[in-house]
Amino acid sequence: MLLLSLLLIPLLGATILGGWQGLGKSCARHLAVIWALLPLVLAVFIGAHQVEPTHGVLAAWESRWLPDAGMSLRFAVDGTSWLFLVLTSFVTLFALAASVRLEIGGRAYCALILVLESMLFGVFTARHFIPWFLCWEMTLIPSYLLIRLWGGPGAPRAALRFFIMTLGGSVFMLLGFLALQLAAGTMDFSKLSALAANHELLPKMAATFVGTGYSGQALLGAVAVCVFLGLAVKLPVFPFHAWLPAAYAEAPTPVTMLLTGLLSKMGVYGLLRLLLPIFPEVLPALAPSLMALAVITVLLGAVAALAQRDLKRILAYSSVNHLGYCAMAVVAAAALQTDRGAHAAAISGTILQAFNHGIIASTIFFCIGLMEQRSGGARTLADFGGLRAQVPVLCSLMGLAVFASLGLPGLSGFVGEFLIFTGVFALVPWAAALAVIGLLLTAVFFLRMVRLVFHGPLNPACAQWLDLSNGERWILAPAIALIIIPGLWPEALLHCLNADTVRLLDLLRILP
């Protein structure tokens, strides 16, 4: 019942907030922060509560739903899922605390965030496509409303673009899994992975759709492309990233923290849970095209960030760049190679990159939100200057997160990128060589931002700024700790992933 409690606690909090008539905005925000502590505590507790340690399952819950169709509500937590659950609960709490400090939202706003948290928990734990897809789609509604109702002047258009593009990608993914249901008779992720590992999925596709005249390889490849399209929009991968810059820029800062810290990680998780284990037979043929898209995403994100002047848009394109590394590593892991160590490095690096980027990017966006609040809404590079002398603590903590984002050794951002490049260099050297250019461009645009915002003569408009208050420091302290500790002690996170990585490599038939 631990997992069921985790799934339902945010929904219960949303119901209480939504039904509590007369609850003031400030009280609603503080109540939401207190309530959001419960999922975080429960998620941490699940990590220490092994129900089936031999199978890597930390918690599980299942209920029959449509037994005649072979459909059940099945949820389970392994080491990989657990890291994403901790990330979700932490970033949600972080965003709600930021909402208190920035005085954004009331009952409806906080309730929508809690609903979003519950649906994200479902995405990261569902082991059957139907509940997984329902949770995946349900994240759209609170996300759309949060951007549309509390965003900036361009929020309606940005929210609509986000909704349409994500929904369009989901249609392709649904069609792909319906084809798998017809061919294999199941949408259960574990069963589909086992069929793929035993090379039974291709003949089933060929036999079911024999009337099309296409081979099982071509049919399963088409299904894999459909699934990839659905995941690529959320990740996002070029050219499906068009919704992201406007949504990040127009959303209120706490919502942007949720978008960059959590929603984009749904795409990374989908690549690891759906695409890689279910389609290993056809991915090698698709790998060159997918790798080209991943490398373009890395380079395009960095070049676009270099061209921006708005701080939020710089960070938005930086997210495209950093998540491109995750796509690149997953595609490399699908290559026909026998280097088990390289595959393990690529997969582990992807998960660490997703986790660490969620913390780092959320921290930077919160700092930008504080700067925007102090400046009365200004957030371009030209609006600041010389802040290091005026607000040294804010600049120091934001600078620490920035250096983590550009991969400084000793901070969390370095670990995931190092493992990704270790794996990709061994598996697909040309992709890693080109992606290094993205690393260099990342350093350029981040250091330019630091120079223009923190150094130089103090902008007169910033002369009356106050440094971080005690409350703001307490909000930032846990995030800063999660940036420093994994950088110095990465084994704390890698230990959670080792068993899952081995099981995935065994499914992919990657031999030592």
Image (cartoon, rainbow, N blue to C red):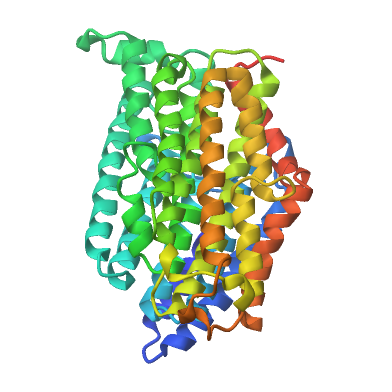
Instruction: Identify which residue, 434 or 19, lies in the foreground.
Output: 434
Instruction: Identify which residue, 215 or 380, lies in the foreground.
Output: 380
Residue 65 coordinates in the image, percent (x, y): 40, 46
Instruction: Identify which residue, 189 or 468, lies in the foreground.
Output: 468
Kindly identify the residue that appears in the image at 44 percent across and 63 percent down: 381
Residue 503 coordinates in the image, percent (x, y): 65, 28
Q: Looking at the picture, does residue 492 appear above or below residue 456?
A: above
* Visible residue check, residue 338: yes
Residue 174 location, quadrant: top left
Q: Residue furthest front?
A: 457
Instruction: Identify which residue, 325 or 458, lies in the foreground.
Output: 458
* Visible residue check, residue 142: no
Would residue 430 be found to the left or right of residue 58 on screen?
left
Q: Looking at the picture, does residue 197 appear above or below residue 34?
A: above
The quarter in which the N terminus is drawn is: bottom right
The quarter in which the C terminus is drawn is: top right
Residue 313 coordinates in the image, percent (x, y): 39, 56
Residue 106 coordinates in the image, percent (x, y): 40, 81
How many numbered marks have been drawn onto this rendered protein structure? 0
Kindly identify the residue that appears in the image at 44 percent across and 73 percent down: 372
Kindly identify the residue that appears in the image at 59 percent across and 25 percent down: 424
Q: Looking at the picture, does residue 469 appear above or below residue 433?
A: below
Would residue 146 be found to the left or right of residue 474 on screen?
left
Q: Looking at the picture, does residue 100 appear above or below residue 304?
A: below
Would residue 478 be found to the left or right of residue 275 on screen?
right
Would residue 416 be found to the left or right of residue 209 on screen?
right
Kindly identify the residue that appears in the image at 47 percent across and 42 percent down: 321
